[in-house]
């Protein structure tokens, strides 16, 4: 039989039983003719001791040349010890990325991550990652897919990089769970975008403005006293927002002037309280049946959102683009300008990595620069003959 052509296949007539016509050039490639008149391209091969036949597509939907190409692909896979039918079934049955994300949530996020981190992972998955790649099969996701996704978010580099980290972890686990071959993480070799760490420190005049507005708010008695206390505690301790908002009275030891936090971003830690911070805590009202220091309006609960209050405070104090987290930076900057060492500041802030505290190192140069300026100015005056 010669090479199968479109004209030859069109001339094939159905009989009361299906039959095969094989291609003369490519062994195993042929066409199956059904009694109904339907004609299906096939490739027949032997894998091990088993003879198998795989459908390639219906004549009319694909051309003979396209079918021949698919047959050649199957033969190449056989030479690489891959059974085309088993691979096809595996691809058909492969989980989608959205199904991988569900297992990722159940077996990693819910088990290994802190509540705040878990919330952020789920937010990023649902808002950014799954709408883009959730419909893809796990085994079909390529580096090109993830590279394009990362590139599409280049205008928000921080968000792009966080999503890339989540994707990387999720596909590492996909390999661990045998859902993808080892070493095929599609995030591999994709470089993160540079991130500019935003560091905003309040000046002495800005701190005075904050203090003035807080005092006015206390006199007006319109704002929640707990919200005012939260801002003061953030400034006086350098704690993270979540550490203060979820602070319980059982964690407060005013005799030793410490907060004994059982859990934080870096694990359990002790926060040492200065006299100003201790005074704020002593002034806070302890509400019966409410274990929290920063109480909210709901019975037995803590205040969950400080942003609306912060926006009102920031507006009245004339602080543009100031974030609540800048209160923590301000605590560190005041510590540096007053001669505290970086290891000491790291201990106060609860840093576990030296490089985290090192971001404040440049602030330590300011007193040195001022001293250099004073000395050089004095020498210059002496050179000019002035006293």
Image (tube, helix red, strand yellow):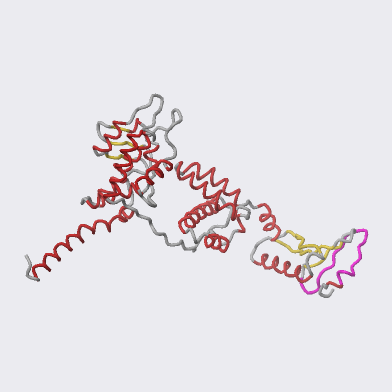
- Which quarter of the rendering shows the C terminus? bottom left
Which residue occupies the foreground of this view, 354 or 242? Answer: 242
Q: Which residues are magenta?
A: 8-26
Residue 23: in magenta span: yes
Q: Number of marks in the image?
A: 0
Residue 13 position, x and y percent, is 91, 65
Compared across the picture, whether 31 is left or right of 354 comes to right
Residue 90 position, x and y percent, is 66, 54
Q: Which of the 4 quarters of the picture holds residue 69?
A: bottom right
Residue 204 position, x and y percent, is 26, 49
- In the picture shown, does residue 298 fall above or below 27? above
Which residue occupies the foreground of this view, 145 or 325? Answer: 325
Residue 301: in magenta span: no
Which residue occupies the foreground of this view, 27 or 212? Answer: 212
Compared across the picture, whether 347 is left or right of 123 comes to left
Q: Residue at x 91, y 62 (%)?
A: 14
Residue 16 position, x and y percent, is 93, 58
Q: Residue at x 80, y 62 (%)?
A: 58
């Amino acid at each position: 039989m010669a090479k199968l052509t479109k004209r030859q296949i069109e001339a094939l007539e159905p009989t009361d039983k299906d039959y095969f016509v094989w291609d003369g050039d490519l062994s195993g490639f042929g066409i199956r003719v059904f009694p109904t008149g339907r004609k299906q391209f096939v490739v027949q091969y032997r894998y091990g001791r088993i003879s198998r036949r795989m459908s390639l597509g219906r004549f009319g939907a694909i051309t003979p040349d396209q079918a021949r190409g698919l047959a050649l692909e199957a033969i190449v896979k056989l030479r690489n010890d891959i059974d085309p039918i088993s691979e096809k079934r595996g691809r058909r049955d492969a989980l989608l990325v959205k199904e991988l994300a569900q297992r990722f949530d159940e077996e990693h996020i819910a088990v290994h991550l802190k509540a705040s981190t878990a919330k952020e992972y789920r937010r990023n998955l649902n808002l950014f990652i799954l709408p883009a790649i959730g419909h893809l099969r796990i085994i079909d996701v390529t580096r090109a897919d993830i590279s394009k996704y990362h590139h599409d978010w280049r205008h928000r580099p921080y968000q792009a990089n966080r999503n890339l980290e989540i994707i990387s972890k999720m596909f590492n686990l996909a390999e661990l769970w045998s859902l993808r071959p080892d070493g095929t993480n599609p995030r591999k070799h994709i470089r993160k975008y540079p991130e500019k760490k935003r560091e905003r420190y309040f000046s002495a005049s800005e701190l005075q403005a904050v203090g003035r507005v807080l005092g006015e708010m206390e006199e007006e008695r319109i704002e929640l006293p707990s919200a005012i206390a939260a801002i003061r505690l953030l400034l006086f301790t350098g704690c993270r927002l979540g550490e203060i908002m979820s602070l319980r009275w059982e964690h407060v030891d005013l005799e030793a002037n410490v907060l004994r936090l059982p859990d934080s971003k870096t694990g359990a830690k002790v926060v040492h309280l200065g006299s100003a911070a201790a005074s704020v805590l002593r002034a806070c009202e302890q509400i019966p049946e409410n274990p929290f220091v920063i109480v909210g309006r709901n019975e037995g609960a803590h205040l969950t959102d400080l942003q609306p209050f912060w926006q009102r405070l920031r507006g009245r104090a004339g602080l543009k683009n100031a974030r609540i987290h800048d209160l923590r930076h301000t605590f560190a900057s005041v510590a540096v300008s007053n001669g505290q060492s970086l290891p000491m500041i790291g201990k106060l802030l609860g840093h576990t990595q030296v490089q985290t505290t090192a971001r404040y190192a440049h602030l330590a140069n300011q007193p040195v620069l001022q001293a250099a300026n004073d000395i050089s100015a004095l020498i210059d005056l002496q050179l000019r003959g002035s006293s």
